[in-house]
Structures are given as C-alpha cells and as structure tokens.
Amino acid sequence: MQVDLNADVGEGAGHDSELMEIISSANVACGWHAGDAGMMRDTVALALSRGVAIGAHPSYPDRDNFGRREMKLPAADVHAHVLYQVGALVAIARAQGARLAHVKPHGALYNQAAADAQLADAVAQAVRDIDPSLAIYGIAGGALIDAARRAGLRAVAEVFADREYQADGTLVPRTHKAAVIEDLERVPARTLLMVREGVVTSVDGRLVPLAAQSICLHGDAAHALAFARAIKITLSAAGIEVRAPAAC
C-alpha cells in the first residue's frame, strides 16, 4: 500500500529543506499569496534535488490575507489567474530541467472550488489548457475532483492530517478555534485511519467516509515538520510507503 504526502512550500516558513526530506509532493506557492520569483526558483531546485514531485499552488490575488479571504470573481478571471500563476512556475521549472506534476489551489480558492462547480471547472480548464498531463489535487469528495475528471485530468483526492472535519466531509472553517489540530499525539493515528480505513472522525464524533490518495500538511504551520516526521514513521510501521502518485 502507498500514499502521497504533500505539503505547501515556498511560503517562507523556513523549514522547507527539512520538510523536503520527508514529503513526496511539494505544492509551490506561485507568488500571489506568498513567495516570489526567486523563492519559486529556489523551491523548485530544492524539490528537484530531493526527488520530490513539483506542483503549483495558485491562489486568489490576496497577499495581505495569505490567500484565505473568499472572493467572488468571474470564472473567466479565475481561469486567467490560474493560467498566469501556473504558467510562471512551469517556465521556472523548465529552466531547471524539471516539469510540474500537479496543481493544487490554495486557501480560499481551494475551499470555494471544492463547493462551487463553476469555479472548479474554471480551475480545471486552466490546468488542462496549460498541460493535460497535470493532475489536480482537491479535497476528497469535493467539486474540484469532479471537475478534474470532467476535464479529462487526473484527480488526486486528498485528506488533511492537521485539520478538523465536519460531518459533511468539509473542513472546519479556520474561523473556528478547533479548525487546526496542534496535538502531535492525535495526528499520526488519525492519519493512518484515513489512509487504511478510508474514514475520519468529524468534530461531532461521526465517522465520515473519504478517499485518501494524498495526505496534506500545511507547510507554513509551526508543527509541520514534527507532524510530517511522525506521520511518515507511523505509515512506515504500518507497511505504507510514502510516494508521489504515478502519472498516467
């Protein structure tokens, strides 16, 4: 059995080098919520040196709020925003002899695309227009997974090791004090349950079914490195290999 372990990087957290020793896929910030051209270049180089799959992490144009403020933009604008950001990272990667493997929207764009089919289609179409071989990462059971499949793209359903879930399979909003899990004792066993059994316990105690092809850790969080290490040790002990999803 195998599963992908991805993290958001290139956001200035300061532990990307250590994190790249553990994860199998890297979501590189494209400059609109964090990072810049130089950081994108350096993060791609780091991932390439570690054999980590490289993905783009585009967001809304919202640097002041780290891309976590919801916006209501026309689908055509979202399509252009994704083209712009992913296209830039494609060029930066290509200049180093690397290529992208996937695209994973960030923050509010990710969460809104998980619930809004029209927005999800705009994201998926932009990815397809850039490179139909790219995969799209989206929350398990969300609209972005369906949109990727409609566009003929690989869809990678991901789960969140360090976020609480609601009974409908969506994440507890960050405005809630219990949204982010900081207890190192809980996260590894919880992650193993998601991967091996395909379920997660919601904040109200219900078992919620989900598909876990990839596990996400928020690379900007202070606990990211400790969580990544503990998760990989737990998965390895259970005979589960951490590996990037195979391309079609």
Image (cartoon, grey):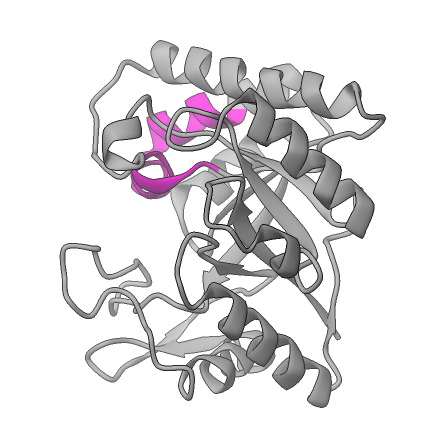
> Residue 167 colored magenta?
no
- The kind of secondary structure the magenta stretch mainly shows is helix
Q: Position of residue 161 (x, y in %)?
A: 45, 69
Q: In this view of the protein, which residue sits in the foreground, 127 or 147?
A: 127
Where does residue 214 sit, x and y in percent of width and height?
59, 59
Q: Quadrant of the N terminus?
A: bottom right
Residue occupying image coordinates x 35% and y 81%: 183
- The residue drawn where x is 45% and y is 77% is 199
Q: Is residue 229 above or below residue 30?
A: below
- Magenta-tinted stretch: 105-124
Does residue 87 lie above or below 111 as drawn?
Answer: above
The quarter of the rendered structure image containing the C terminus is top right
- Left or right of residue 162: residue 74: left
Question: Residue at image x 41%, y 31%?
Answer: 120
Q: Quadrant of residue 119?
A: top left
Outermost residue, front side: 14
Q: Residue 169: percent from the left, percent from the top?
A: 33, 63
Residue visible at 46% across and 56% down? Answer: 140
Q: Nearer the viewer, residue 62 or 161?
A: 62
Relative side of 112 to 106, left or right: left
In percent of width and height, residue 48 lies at: 78, 41
Give residue 96's quadrant in the image. top right
Residue most toward the left? 176
Above or below, 239 against 225 in this view is below
